[in-house]
Amino acid sequence: MSQTVDRALSILPLLAEGPASLEQVATRLDVHKSTALRLLRTLHEHGLVYRQQDQRYRLGARLFALAQQAVEALDIRGIAHPHLAALNERTGHTVHLAVYEQGEVVYIDKVESRYPVRMYSRIGRPVAITVAAVAKLLLADLPEPERRAVAEGLDYPRYTARSTPDAGAFLAELARVRDQGWASDLGGHEESINCVGAPLRGPDGRVCAAMSVSAPNVVVTAEELLRLRPLILRTAEAIGAELSGATPPAPAPAPTATKGATR
């Protein structure tokens, strides 16, 4: 990378910390004021930097527009699918990918298990929002007022004895999910199905999708499925890193063998 480009790009994270004067920019870059001014003027011409009335510089609106366009252009399903398929290959269990759209949590990808038992979930269909692990992950990341409004506007069907009973219990569960960074549905929708999920974070650090691994308890117990949590979280981190253009985490060690992985 040329020195000029390197210096110009170094200005952006500096201004991300807050507005800065010409002198502050020059000092941080360790260059003469005339050099810093030339770089700032070029960035200003492209809308990446804006000069305020107090003569300090801040990030420009064009930069935020570009960032938004980049986020909207991300093909979450396309990026995530190879990771989901690899996770399915390692565990043998059903893997789902879901997003939150217009008040519903919808599956956008699914990799079927390799054992005869099949789940009835379908791509494009909404999930049971009050119990599904992916739904908990997506709603837990909403701002508190929106999270509360959504929870209080939901119905709470009693699918099983373990289903979420009401808005208060759901909000408490979302708080736990937000703190611990993962979610589960252990017989909340179907007595015989357990699920463990992890959030996928986009370039802005927000949860943009959620993934999960599901299996019937005739194949693996809830405890056995929960042992896969480190692998599931590492897979979600790898997808998030690719979405954000960051360095992916090191591969996780092979999980403890389960009945589902050997059938």
Image (cartoon, helix red, strand yellow):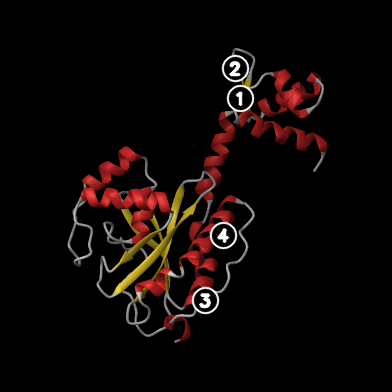
Tell me the CA gap for discs 4 and 3: 15 Å
**Mark 4: few/some/many CA within 10 Å (<14, 14-19, 20+):** many
Circle 2 is placed at which residue position?
Answer: 52
**Corner quadrant of residue 195:** bottom left
Which quarter of the figure has residue 31?
A: top right
Callout 2–callout 3 Cβ contact below 8 Å: no
Q: CA distance from mark 1 to mark 2?
A: 7 Å
Q: Is residue 144 above or below residue 38?
A: below
Kind of residue at badge 2: Gln
The residue that disc 3 covers is: 90
User: Which of the two discs, 3 and 1, labels the residue nearer the N terminus?
Assistant: 1
Between the C-alphas of marks 2 and 4, the distance is: 39 Å
Q: Residue at x 37, y 40 (%)?
A: 143
Task: Please provide percent x and percent y for residue 235.
Answer: 52, 63
The amino acid on which the numbered mark 1 sits, given as a three-letter code, is Arg
Question: In x, y percent, where is residue 204?
Answer: 52, 43
Callout 1 touching callout 2 (CB < 8 Å): yes
Mark carried by residue 58: 1
Residue depth check, mark 3 versus mark 1: number of the one nearer the observer: 3
Q: Position of residue 114 (x, y in %)?
A: 44, 82
* Residue at 80%, 19% in the rendered image: 34
CA gap between label 4 and label 1 equals 32 Å
Q: Earlier in the sequence, mark 4 or mark 1?
A: 1
Residue highlighted by disc 4:
238
Are there few (<14), some (14-19), or many (20+) residues within 10 Å of tag 2? few
